[in-house]
Image (tube, rainbow, N blue to C red):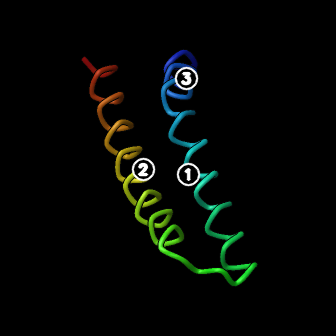
Amino acid sequence: MRNITQVKLKYLSFYYFWLIFFVACIAFDFYMGILTGFTFGYMAAFVYMFIRLKSVEKQLENYHDE
């Protein structure tokens, strides 16, 4: 069981990094008060990466169950 979490973390760390990065970008824009098209692009990218993260998690679970 421990190996499954290490394997999952290896594959999912990419997605976690980008989620943290997009949150930092959005927070910076709100803090500085400079809402531009990039801010909304960061929000859209965050939503996409979150949905993709959940999809990959589910695929990894199914792969390890087989």
> Vertical placement of 2 versus 32: above or below?
above
Instruction: Please give the label number shown on residue 42.
Output: none
Of label 2 and label 3, which has the lower sequence position?
3
Give left or right: position of 10 versus 31: left
Q: Amino acid at mark 1?
A: Leu
Image coordinates of residue 49 in percent, x first then y, are: 42, 50
Callout 1: few (<14), some (14-19), or many (20+) C-alpha neighbours within 10 Å?
A: many
In this rendering, position of residue 61 left or right of residue 40 = left
Give the crowd class for mark 3: few <14, some 14-19, many >=20 residues within 10 Å.
Answer: few
> Residue type at mark 3?
Lys
Distance between the Cα atoms at labels 2 and 3?
Answer: 16 Å
| Nearer-N-terminus badge (1/3) | 3
Name the residue nearer the viewer: 46 or 11: 46
Picture disc at residue 10: 3
Badge 2, how many Cα within 10 Å: few under 14, some, many 20+?
Answer: some
- Residue at left offset 37%, top offset 46%: 54
Placement of the C terminus among the 4 image quadrants: top left
- Residue 58 falls in which quadrant of the image? top left
- Please give the residue where the numbered disc 2 appears in the rendered image: 49
Q: Nearer the viewer, mark 1 or mark 3?
A: 1
Residue 27 as seen in the image, left or right of residue 10: right
Disc 1 target residue: 19
